[in-house]
Amino acid sequence: MSDSRTRLQTVLKALGLDLKAYEGSDWTSRAPRDGAVLATVKSHTASEAEAAVQGAHQAYLAWRTVPAPVRGELVRRLGEVLRTHKAALGELVSLEAGKITSEGLGEVQEMIDICDFAVGLSRQLHGLTIASERPGHRMMETWHPMGVVGIISAFNFPVAVWSWNAALALVCGNAIVWKPSEKTPLTAIACQHLMQQVVDAFNAEKPGAIPAGLSQLLIGGRDVGEALVASHLVPIVSATGSTRMGRQVGVKVAERFGRSILELGGNNAMIVTPSADLELAARAITFAAVGTAGQRCTSLRRLIVHRSVADTLLARLEKIYQSIAIGDPLADGTLVGPLIDQAAFDGMQQALAQARAEGGEVLGGERVREDLGTDAWYVRPALVKMPKPTKVMESETFAPILYVVTYDGDTEQAIAIQNGVPQGLSSAIFTANLSDAERFMSSAGSDCGIANVNIGTSGAEIGGAFGGEKETGGGRESGSDAWKGYMRRATNTVNYSGALPLAQGVRFDV
Ligand code: UN1
């Protein structure tokens, strides 16, 4: 048995998970670390997807009347179970998505954090009281559940993105149906299994507390995703993935006046100004650009450096890039694990070829560690000096490629370069100059959903709203008031005056 298979068995045991019910031959889960097949699983069909949605809708009809703090108790227990199984689930993320140990664990921590956040939120789903213009009237807003939330997630955050949506949707009184990436079915099955454990324990204590079918998992491809997107019983579709996918989902959901929460491509940039702490910047750049092998939506892809500091910063980066530890994500000391698969490797090579054709000077980017498996795709992260911003820099390649351009003028010039792409997820500036920092965060500054100062573009905390503008899709998930995206708002006006004054002074006497 391959090392990955052996590790999988240990992890499944720790999770108390038997894969039997899911086994089949439709989808293959591979360990990117050595290319070994972890399992083959069966797909749900489109009609099973419809049945799941029907079941979830029934569950929602009951769940919406459960007091929100009781709904929060379910999510609190989910957080507890995740704490208990953090090590095992984190390792499964590393096995199936190829993340280094620390990042696998970090992803599970992100799940725990959002559960904690959602528990607090379950007592704070409050609306405003608004001054009425009419005597003896009270006006207010109340927030209500919507129905089934369809969750479509990507391979690169195979569990955290589900939890952002699941934790909020559940405390908000919705049911959830999840279609994970075809590349990461096992981590999804593990989450569903842990959730089911929580539900069963809750129901054993309080029979009927949690309606059957409240949280469902659909393993499948495009047809299953399309069934979710098309269903009138799914008022909200939260989809994370490529801009191409989001363009289709967004239109389809809009056609039926559903709501979509889209988290699509990022093409994130960092500006480094003359006053920046270059050592700090180099560390932040490295984590953002090569961490997770450049496979985060928030990964740093474009570096915009002032010419006066470019040589010093690049010399430092080149040194780091040449010596960074690339290898088995489960081995101690590794910082860069593998790409998810060969298609990702091919996409990276294509982008690098295009960059060269556009005048780029490429350092790194080659395949390494072939000794770890013929179907394991490790690369040296690529640092690419571009003569100016070119076409290749306008699209996102899900791999560790960092394009570097310089600017000579003021920060406005750098901001214009940064904003000059179709995407708008995350951005950062390194500077010790207050005006530069404030300008960057101002309405004339970064046009992204995330604009950081003196930290990198990736690794956002769950407390803030997460998402971006333009082709990133405009959705917001996770913290702040992102919960409002999972509820409908009702404006209520109550008349206790005994008379019937009309608004705007209208007279209509009958
Ligand atoms: C993603 O890549 O889809 O900010 C999510 C970050 C993580 C989430 C990334 N907290 O990098």
Image: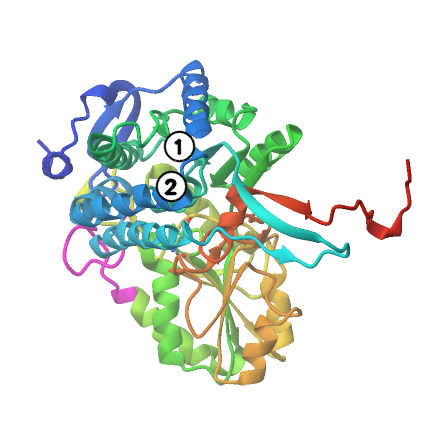
User: How crowded is the residue under tag 2: few (<14 C-alpha within 10 Å), some, or many (20+)?
Assistant: many
User: Residue at coordinates 22% horizontally, 57% vertically from top-left?
Assistant: 102
Segment colored magenta: 322-338
Residue that numbered label 2 is attached to: 162
First-in-chain label (2 vs 1): 2
Q: Residue 90 got which mark? A: none
Q: Residue 178 got which mark? A: 1
User: Residue at coordinates 55% horizontally, 49% vertically from top-left?
Assistant: 472
Amino acid type at circle 1 is Trp
**Residue 273 in the image: above or below residue 168:** below
Residue 244 location (% of width, % of height): 55, 38
Residue 444 among those drawn in magenta: no
Q: Is residue 243 visible?
A: no
Residue 228 location (% of width, % of height): 49, 26
Determine whether label 2 and label 1 are within 8 Å by CB: yes
**Residue 346 in the image: above or below residue 185:** below
Q: Nearer the viewer, residue 312 or 160?
A: 160
